[in-house]
Amino acid sequence: MKRLSVLIFCVLVFMPLLAQRLTIDKASFKHDVMNREAQIDDNLPKDLNDKPCALLKVMVADKVTKCEGGNVGSIVDEGMVKRIYISPTAKYVTLYFQNHFPMKIVFADYGNTCLQSMETYEVALIDPAPGPQPQQAQGNFLVMTVNPANASVTIDNVHETLNSDGSLKKYLTNGRHSYKIDAGNAYSPISGMIEMKGERISLPVTLQSVKASLTVRTATLGSQIYINEDYKGTDSWQGSLTPGTYLVEARKDGYRSVSTTVTLSKQQTETVTLPALQQIFGSLMVDYTPVDADVYLDNRLIGKTPNVFSNIAAGKHSVKISKAGYADFTGNVTIDGNLQASVKGSLRESSSVVGSVVPISVNGVSFNMVKVKGGTFMMGATAEQTNPLEYEKPVHKVTLSSYYIGETEVTQALWKAVMGNTVRDQRDKEKTSMPMCGEGDNYPMYYVSWNECQDFIQKLNEKTGRHFRLPTEAEWEFAARGGKKSRNTQYSGSGNVDDVAWYHDHSGTHPVATKKANELGIYDMSGNVNEWCHDWIEPYNSSAQTNPTGPSSGYGRVYRGGGFLMGAEFCRLSSRHDWSPDFRIADLGFRLALSE
């Protein structure tokens, strides 16, 4: 009995000495901005300050027994992945394990003073304990690294699967072994023999490309280059192609396309110059009443109504019809070569116009600002807003002065007229393969951060002499509800989301003003793209407010309205969210505001 007690004492005393320390794979710690797990988690806990937690996904084989540090929330064990909910005020977290020493993770070590609320982060923990050494007496490992990583590898006529980085480890017995590596028509295959002598062999393999190099140039500025119907770029393109025959084409709106074929052999270098494109012309019939209204094409006066106008360049054009005492008509028309387009209708008398509209023109691009008469409304999750979230409450009284707000979201044409770049240029700033979700002059602008909106507004004000800005969150919601003409619908202009919104059931963005307007004649305040507001995010309170502008600082700027990546529930008038002001995403744009 005494010997057993001694044995138990020794086990208890020396057991901690058997534990190992985990290390942090620093390269694995990342803020996964495209991961919305935390945002759509209905059970996302809140910390002691009632702030929604951040989600930290820890990859580790050992069991996490508890966490400490800064209002840490709950832990969910999913095997190799532990989901740990952490307060956005926490500076660090200490993890306790079943078989390893505790570990403290200080977020500032990885560029994050704190983790952002409702955002997802990842980190991997590594056990540095050495594993068993390979058996050298009878054989050893062949460690192969192959470029390209999608090549097919066979060893001794048996197919082997490469890892995503092109690596492969294979235990081979001593002796001679054959291998073959093939990556299809784009590379020259190789084969050979290796002889194992009880030692590990490293074999880096880079297949030689057989691709040809092709350069394409166009003689007409702004021509888009297509190769086998795939868009490659504008004005010029250079790249590698597998040997074969290709259709090379230059296209531009309003011009006849030109094309040629080119046959490329292995490792050939070739240049193709496409000739100048021939411009196409058509005609436009404008049949509008009253007679003698002014007709503007691309902001240039071309005549009076009714009339037929000839020799108009094919492509998209803006049209405005104006006469004193009537509300202007503005729209777009597409001219096809050798065909006649038409615009028909009647101008409304000024007394029938809903609200006041201020037309603005910048570098040939026109847009309208709609007046929103001041008033008092109940902001937040009012009775018609089904299944509201907590941050939409409580409902509170807000009084606003009159102001103007954009009739539509800022379009790609207006952005380019002010900033000089395109939505594709904005996407490319992320240096990722994120998709394009709708391109064209009349599509809403997206892939813009809150900070970039401020740059746009500063340049727009310099060009116009006005004082544009982003709408406050209260101004945005009052306008979306229809101002003093509100019919108390769940979405902006209707109780049926499909009447007014492009959302998750549809594909990508759509041109602005293609759904029904709301009570003030404003479009797309539900759906299409989310819209940045001026305010920093903060919880609502029940106090009445007048012209609120939000707190002076914070961690996220408000965005409203819902977008094509989101479900119908996010298109409700009271739904509200926030992102970091330097964040860009495919369903986040903005509209302008202007004080009276």
Image (tube, grey):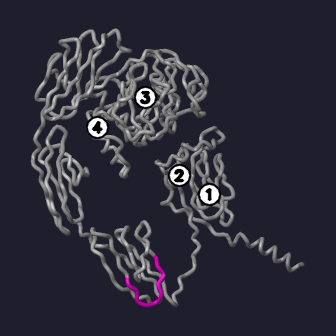
Which label lies toward us, 3 or 1?
A: 3
Question: Quadrant of the rendered structure where residue 436 is?
Answer: top left
Q: Could you tell me how many numbered marks the image carries?
A: 4
Whichever of labels 3 and 1 marks the residue nearer the N terminus, that label is 1
Does residue 41 appear anywhere in the picture? yes
Whichever of labels 2 and 3 marks the residue nearer the N terminus, that label is 2
In the rendered structure, find residue 440 and report the number of the disc placed on it. 4
Residue drawn at (46%, 48%), measured in percent from left and top? 34
Residue 279: give x, y in percent of width and height. 11, 38
Mark 2 highlights which residue? 121
CA distance for labels 4 and 3: 21 Å
Mark 1 highlights which residue? 78
Q: Which residues are magenta?
A: 169-178
Q: Nearer the viewer, residue 394 or 408?
A: 408
Q: Amino acid at mark 1?
A: Glu
**What residue occupies the far front of the structure in this picture?**
339
Whichever of labels 4 and 3 marks the residue nearer the N terminus, that label is 4
Which label lies toward us, 2 or 3?
A: 3
CA distance for labels 3 and 1: 41 Å
Crowd tier of the residue under label 3, counting other residues whose Cα lies within 10 Å: few below 14, some 14–19, many 20 or above: many
CA distance for labels 1 and 4: 45 Å
CA distance for labels 2 and 3: 35 Å
Which label lies toward us, 1 or 2?
A: 1
Crowd tier of the residue under label 1, counting other residues whose Cα lies within 10 Å: few below 14, some 14–19, many 20 or above: few
Mark 3 highlights which residue? 500
CA distance for labels 1 and 2: 16 Å
Crowd tier of the residue under label 2, counting other residues whose Cα lies within 10 Å: few below 14, some 14–19, many 20 or above: many
